[in-house]
Image (spheres, rainbow, N blue to C red):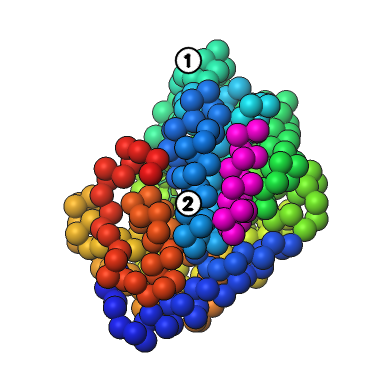
Amino acid sequence: MTVTSPDTAARAAGLLSRPVAINGLTVPNRIAMAPMTRMFSPGGVPGEDVVSYYSRRAAAGVGLIVTEGTYVGHDSAGLSDRVPRFHGEEQLAGWAKVAEAVHAAGGTIVPQLWHIGMVREQGQAPYPQAPAVGPSGVRTDGTEGRGEAMTQADIDDVVAAFARAAADAERIGFDGVELHGAHGYLIDQFLWSRTNRRTDAYGGDPVARTKFAAEVVAAVRAAVSPQFPVIFRYSQWKQDAYDARLAETPQELEAILAPLAAAGVDAFHASTRRYWIPEFEDSDLNLAGWTKKLTGRPAITVGSVGLNGEFLEAFQGRGAELGGLDDLLDRMERDEFDLVAVGRALLQDPNWAAKVLDGRFDELVPYDAASLTSLS
Ligand SMILES: Cc1cc2nc3c(=O)[nH]c(=O)nc-3n(C[C@H](O)[C@H](O)[C@H](O)COP(=O)(O)O)c2cc1C
C-alpha cells in the first residue's frame, strides 16, 4: 500500500465496508479472499487446521471467502491427494466444519469447484488409473498424445459432477459456489481455441466453445435453490501462458459472457494478475469492469492488490506500476466492480482485511513467499 492519509483511511472504510448482494446472499463487505490451492488436506479431507485457516480470516474482516480449488467427484478431476475434494462423506464433513466456523466468525464462504482437465498426467493421485481428459486431448502448451478427447458421455458425467458438488455445497451450509473456469483448467480448456479443437457443437467459434461452460452453469443452477449464488471465475491468462487471450475485443468477450449469464451466473470473478491494467484499448476499464458493463452482473476484481513494487519486480522480472489503494477506491467509487479479491496479501497476513478496514496501513506487512509453507 502506498497510502496512509486519514482521508484515504476514511474512504477505504466507507467504500469497502458496504454490504453487497449476490443473488440471495448479502456479503457483509467488499473484501473477498481469492481462491488459493494450499495442499494441506491429506486424503482430500480439510481438517481442523484448514477450518482455523479460513475462519481466522473471516474473523478478521474478510467478507467473502472463496476456498481453494476443490475437486468435483470425477476420477479425472485432479492431480494431488492433498488438494481437498468436494465429494465423499469424510471430505464433505470436513468442509461442513469449515463453513460453520466461517459463519460463526461473521463471514460468508463459497467453495471453488474444480476440474483440472488436461493439466494432469495419467498416474497421478488421487485416481492414478484415470486418464487425463479435455476437449481435444490437447495440453495447454498445445501438445497432443497423452490425453483423451472427451466423449459426449464424459462431458455429461463431468457436468453432472459439478451439479452434484453444487447441490452438496448448499446442503452442507455453504453460501454459494464458484465455478473454476479460469487459468487453463478444464472449463477454460473448452473456452480456449488452443486446447479446444473440436468440430462438434462444443468447438468452433467463441459461442460454441462456451457451450460446455454454459452447460455446467445451467446444471449447477438447476441443482440448487434459485437464490443460491453461482459465481463464475474466468481469465484471459493461463497458468503456463500469461499472454493468452480468450477475447481481443469487448465484442468477443461479450460472445463468451452472455451465454454464461443467460445460463444462470449471478456474479463473475475476472481473474487478472494486476487489476489496474486496462483490458482493451481506449478505455481504463479492467477485465472485471468490462465484465460488469457487458453482463450487468456484479463483478469481482483481483490481481496484486496490496503487494508492493519490490515484490512485482522480483517475482515478475520487470518493474510494474503499482495500483495503490487510492486507485482501487477510485474504481470502486465509479462502480467499475463490486468486490475486490485478495490473494497473497491475505496469505501473508490473516488480519489484512481488518487492518485495511480500520485504516491501520502502517501495520501491513510485505508479502513473503515463505507464507506458502504453512497454513498460518
Ligand atoms: C498459492 C496460490 C494458489 C492459487 N490457487 C488458485 C486456485 O486454486 N484457484 C484459482 O482460481 N486461482 C488460484 N490462484 C490465483 C489467485 O486466486 C489469485 O487470482 C492470484 O494470486 C492473484 O491475486 P493476488 O495478486 O492478490 O495474489 C492461486 C494463487 C496462489 C498464489
Indicate whether 124 appears above or below 30: above
State the residue lying farthest toward the bottom: 7
| Residue for badge 2 | 56
What is the magenta segment's predominant secondary structure?
A: helix
Frontmost of labels 2 and 1 is: 2
- Magenta part of the chain: 92-110
Q: For residue 309, which quarter of the picture?
A: bottom left
Residue 6 coordinates in the image, percent (x, y) = 34, 85
| Residue for badge 1 | 123
Q: Which type of secondary structure does the marked residue at label 2 adopt?
A: helix
Q: Which mark sits nearer the N-terminus, 2 or 1?
A: 2
* Label 1 CA crowd tier, 10 Å (few <14, some 14–19, many 20+): few
Verify CB contact (< 8 Å) between mark 2 and mark 1.
no
Whole-angstrom CA distance, mark 2 to mark 1, is: 36 Å
State the residue lying farthest toward the front: 104
Examine the structure image and report whether residue 249 is included in the region drawn in magenta: no
